[in-house]
Amino acid sequence: MGATSSSPKELSSSSQSVLTFPLIEEDDGQQHQPPPQHDDATNNNTSVQITRSAKLYAFCAALNSCNLGYDIGVNTGAGILLQNTLELSDLQLEAFFGSLNLFAMAGALSSHLVNDKFGRRWSFRVAATIFIFGTILQSAAYSYVVLMIGRAFVGLGVGFGLAVDPLYIAEISPPQHRGRLVNWSEFAINLGIVFGFASGLMFATVDETVAWRWMFSMGAILPCFVIYFATFVMPESPRWLVANDRDGEACEVLKKVYPDGYDVDVIVTEIKESIEKERIAEHAVGWGVILFPSPAFKRILMVGMGISIAQQAVGIDAIIYFLVFILKQSGINSRITQMWILVGLGLIKLGVIFLAGRLLDRTGRRPLVFISLVGMSVSFFIVAMSFIGAVASEVGAIVGLGLYLAFFSIGMGPATWTIASEVFTTSIRAKAMSLATFGNRATATIFASSFLSVSNAMGSSNFFIMMTLVCLVILLWMCYYLPETKGLSLEEMAHYFAEITGDESILEVEGLNRREVDRPNDPEQDILL
């Protein structure tokens, strides 16, 4: 599914050309070393300070991710109102929710047409404009057909924007701060969810036939800011400028995001080398390595694609979309109370995401993923128990849902794309990320499009017991297959998978020398063998 570059002038955005939320610290898969033999002492990558301009540009780009978060959050509160007003069946509502991912994938796949030819700033403008048009159609819809047409445009705008958000931030940021700044995009999605929840509270006392229209309409506000920032505040990506032989303009942008006195000519040279290396790597290996993988590549794909699919198999998108339905089934019928609970749950999720960003590089990926899966299993069990008996437990449902969102956000949420980006080696990186993202979004679509029907058919208690078992099965799978990727370079990962599978052909594909490497310094790695 990933588009491939055909010349040095075309950027390596193929790995971002599908709907994806990766938090990739190294956008080119290379280790950025300090510039060699340079006279300026300040031109040392180990001491580069983040500038206000870099923070400002990253903030503006991350704001675009709020659109996806807002759409998720606003539909959580508006879904049941929408169903009542337009007299939608459960299947129609599920299709409305689940279709966003399908339309978003189409938008992301087409984003490179503008992204590579006209630049990142135009991509932001186009994405925001499409989103606004779709939002207006949804707000004005009096039939299911018009509603779905609006949904299609919203999805296209979301996918188009999310294909460029992390890419732009990674390209505008110094390597030492790239992981932190790209994380802002993930944080912005969760902030958007809170905004969407808050819109439900804002219109909780308004007649339900009108309230959902106002809630959808509020979604057009953020994209207007994005258009303004992309036009008057954000510069073009230096990587795109270099790829289009506009080195002078790239240097001017780099001078703003690097400290005063830094020799940005070195960065321009590194960008050129990186683009050429990615072009060579992209064309050196075809789809055969992925479709008919050797043991080492098969293990890599099982880890990267497995955790990407597992992230949605625990039901996160579907659970958030149908939170109000779950609260209503637990006995909470007041709209105002429901909206207050949503805002509280959203703030919990947002706060834990902020904490997880700090823990990910300190504790490693495996521990947080394991804690996350165990915690979600317990949380689902609590929710299941709250529905056993003649009267459902409101407190049990709220506590269980709060714990679920918190435990998801501490591990499976932020760690998934970090792990995927770290295990996929250079030769398969773009194609593998595309497949992993497709699997992630396809799973999200299936769950969101069937949640209500399956839950009603099984009964709430049985459904959440099933989800408890799903989390435990994923936990066992992760215990066996998931390595600790913290602090390992792509070269070290290739050697690691070659060692545990006995397949040294991966080293030849990656152009690495055969050598013995110590296994990751983690006693838990014995589980993998």
Image: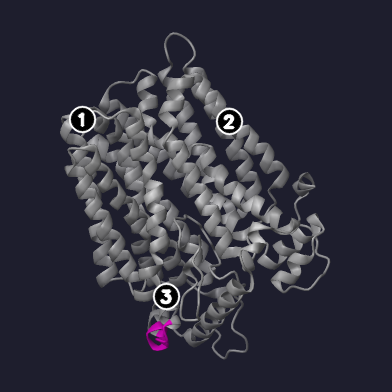
Residue 247: say if magenta: yes
Instruction: Say left or right for 143 vs 276.
Output: left
Instruction: Say left or right for 206 vs 20.
Output: left
Secondary element at image label 3: helix
- Earlier residue among tags 2 and 1: 1
Query: Local crowd at mark 3 within 10 Å, few (<14), some, or many (≥20)?
Result: many
Secondary element at image label 2: helix
The reply to whether callout 2 and callout 3 are in contact (CB within 8 Å) is no
| Residue occupying the point 27% across, 35% down | 78
The residue indicated by pointer 1 is 85
- The type of residue carrying mark 3 is Val
- The type of residue carrying mark 1 is Thr
Secondary element at image label 1: helix
Mark whose residue sits in front, 2 or 1: 1
Instruction: Say left or right for 389 vs 513.
Output: left
Can you say whether 479 is above or below 377 in the image? Answer: below
- Earlier residue among tags 3 and 1: 1
Q: Can residue 221 be seen at all in this image of the molecule? A: no
- The type of residue carrying mark 2 is Ser
Mark whose residue sits in front, 2 or 3: 2
Q: Can residue 151 be seen at all in this image of the molecule? A: yes
The magenta region covers 244-251
Q: Residue furthest bottom?
A: 39
The residue indicated by pointer 3 is 257
Can you say whether 392 is above or below 72 in the image? Answer: above
The label on residue 425 is none
The residue indicated by pointer 2 is 377
- Earlier residue among tags 2 and 3: 3
Instruction: Say left or right for 233 vs 27.
Output: left
